[in-house]
Image (tube, rainbow, N blue to C red):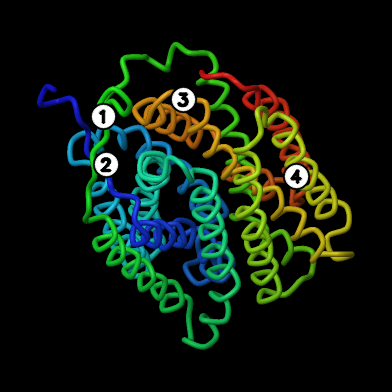
Amino acid sequence: MTPHSRHAVLAGTTLLAVAVTLAAANLRISVTSLSSVLGDVQGSLTATSAWASAVTAAPSICFGLAALVSPWLARRIGGGPAIAAALAVLVIGLGVRVLAGSGLLLVGTFIACAGIAVCNVLVPVVVKESFPNRIGLITGVYSASLAGGSAIAAAVTPQLETAAGGWRPALAAWAIPAGLALAAWLVGARRDTTVLAGDQPKHSDRNLLRVPMAWVFTLLFAAQSIFAYVVMGWLPEILRDAGIDRDAAGVLLGITMVVAVPLNLVIPHLAAKLRSQSWVMVGLTVAPVLGVLGVMLAPTAAPLLWALLLGAGTTIFPVVLLMMGLRTRNSAETTQLSGMSQGFGYLIAAGGPFAAGLVHASLGSWTVPLILVLGILAAQALLGAIIGRPRYI
């Protein structure tokens, strides 16, 4: 056996599973906490509509750029240390964004999202490497925790703003759970185990940029991201413009996020057992189409129902993450596909929330942006059906 014939991975312990869960809970709080009070922040800083659009687009832009370098970072320092560093960067960004005006808020948002992006790419790789026999279950727990954290941040931040006397302390408070996640990761990711290098190579010799199915994955990731970040970035403002008050709009965004929790625990686990996932991918597009139609045509008629339907649509995210593991031959390919699809996918998706804000500011209506979202969902169904076919990329 040669010195390079074994490859160290994080041991799949209960502590690591807890650390993955807590890390996931913090991977959208920077987005939903801000979007739930965005109108108040914009008014306080006398910022423009273009600035508000840039803030909603910043996560996708930063996720994309950071995702492209995440595989390189993992090779340089290891996946576990890279995730720890990313969580530390998240804590810093959440603190920085409340210190001054609109410019620093945008900078802090980028810093926080850079940390999130590294975790977006590398945590699913840890799940594949460290929990190979429970990939569906752990992916579901990871995604449910992510959705739960998003929901809590969306629903609680407006209440924190009222209780703390301003949006700055309300947003700063979210650095605390991020710090707890960092501490849990430092404890849970301490143990390594080894696998045969033939089963888990460190590098992939394939250039996925030349693989058509990898680009289908990338476009699918972009489509589901556009939907998710238009909802997370603008749903409270859409509802407020329809006459729903700030606190209720924040709670409805929270409901949109939390409804995914039980679905994320079940659907990826079930999907992993199927030979083909095509109908699952198509089926997960029906609910958000109905939700978007409801918000567009009768936003105040049944806002709770629309929130539930929109939230059900976000369940496609963990299934896409699951598919990255199922459609690749080893963790090296999973890392490369994850970095490519999230990197380019998020960069493509950044145009979604940015364009939605600008079009609304120009037309004074949310109808056209929501029609465009319906088109994106149609593309998502088609791409998902292709990816769901049982084959390696």
Disc 2 versus disc 1: nearer the observer: 1
Would residue 220 appear left or right of 279 to someone viewing this image?
A: left
| Viewer-nearest residue: 268 or 305 | 268
Q: Residues within 10 Å of mark 1 (few under 14, many from 20)?
A: few
> Residue 340, which numbered label?
none
- Residue 330 falls in image quadrant: top left
Counting residues from the start of the chain, the first of labels 2 and 3 encountered is 2
Q: Amino acid at mark 4?
A: Leu
Disc 4 versus disc 2: nearer the observer: 2
Report the residue at 25% width, 46% height from top: 82
Quarter of the figure that contains the N terminus: top left
Q: Residues within 10 Å of mark 3 (few under 14, many from 20)?
A: some
> Residue 9, which numbered label?
2
For the residues marked 1 and 4, what is the alpha-carbon distance in whole angstroms?
A: 50 Å
Q: Residues within 10 Å of mark 2 (few under 14, many from 20)?
A: some
For the residues marked 2 and 3, what is the alpha-carbon distance in whole angstroms?
A: 18 Å
Disc 4 versus disc 3: nearer the observer: 3
Mark 4 lies on residue: 370
Counting residues from the start of the chain, the first of labels 4 and 3 encountered is 3
Counting residues from the start of the chain, the first of labels 3 and 1 encountered is 1
Q: Residues within 10 Å of mark 4 (few under 14, many from 20)?
A: many
Report the residue at 35% width, 40% height from top: 66
Counting residues from the start of the chain, the first of labels 1 and 4 encountered is 1
Disc 1 versus disc 4: nearer the observer: 1
Counting residues from the start of the chain, the first of labels 4 and 2 encountered is 2
